[in-house]
Image: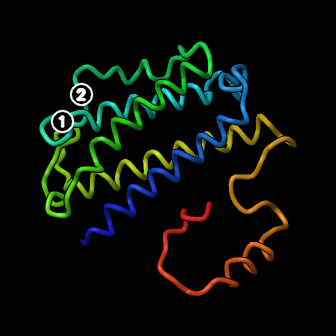
Amino acid sequence: MNSSYLSSIIKQFEYYKSLSEKTFDQLTDNDIHWQYNPESNSIAIITKHIVGNMLSRWTNFLNEDGEKTWRQRDQEFENTYTNKIEMLQAWEKGWNCLFNAIKPLTEEELEQIIYIRNQGHTIAEAINRQLAHYSYHIGQLVFLGKMITNDNWKSLSIPKGKSKSYNREKFSKKKGRRHFTEDL
């Protein structure tokens, strides 16, 4: 493992955070509470779960189990945000906790063992586990956002019918090593 892992993983987390925020930007206070049916989760509920997970996993993660005794996971699936501003404030708190935990890491620390529910993970494994978990839920957020906004949805990637022009622009540039998020 080399130091490019840490910079790459931070960019990946930033990318998924931005996808969510571009989705949130397209939604109203009412939209964040929309549910397909009573058993499904709204955007507000999924966001609350992501935030709860982040705060639990990344608070004092080097010294404490990632599943904190103070976490109330079941309550994360109760719709308690009253508006989008409240949801976004919690969202920032979760992401700040994550970035404050991983940005200072060094390559040497990546093999250190930490615990989540008493299961040992290297720090690199824990980071990968959480990146997969968050991207799974962020995909849900984006899908719900697209369902809610319907014809008013603003694409977060290559819009339909624009692949050829997108690729033409990409291949017009010289080959070079760069992260795919650098020109988004």
Q: Are marks 1 and 2 in contact (CB under 8 Å)?
A: yes
Please tell me how crowded label 1 is: few (under 14), some (14-19), or many (20+) other residues with Cα within 10 Å.
many
| x, y percent for residue 11 | 44, 57
Farthest-out residue, right = 151
Q: Is residue 105 left or right of residue 135?
A: left
| x, y percent for residue 13 | 44, 51
Q: Which residue was labeled with disc 2?
A: 68
Which quarter of the rendered picture does the N terminus lie within? bottom left
Frontmost residue, 86 versus 182:
182
At 30% from the left edge and 31% from the top edge, which residue is drawn? Answer: 56
| x, y percent for residue 133 | 43, 46
> Hey, which quadrant is residue 84 in on the image?
top right
Which quarter of the rendered picture does the C terminus lie within? bottom right
| Residue 38 visible somewhere in the drawing | yes
The colouring scheme, among rainbow, by chain, secondary structure or one colour, is: rainbow
At 59% from the left edge and 12% from the top edge, which residue is drawn? Answer: 82
Q: Is residue 58 left or right of residue 168?
A: left
Frontmost residue, 36 versus 178:
178
Q: Is residue 117 above or below residue 72?
A: below
Q: Is residue 73 above or below residue 17?
A: above
Q: Is residue 107 left or right of residue 44?
A: left
At 70% from the left edge and 38% from the top edge, which residue is drawn? Answer: 145
Label 1 sits on what residue type?
A: Asp
Please tell me how crowded label 2 is: few (under 14), some (14-19), or many (20+) other residues with Cα within 10 Å.
some
Q: CA distance from mark 1 to mark 2?
A: 6 Å
Label 2 sits on what residue type?
A: Lys
Q: Which residue was labeled with disc 1?
A: 65
Which numbered tag is attached to residue 55?
none
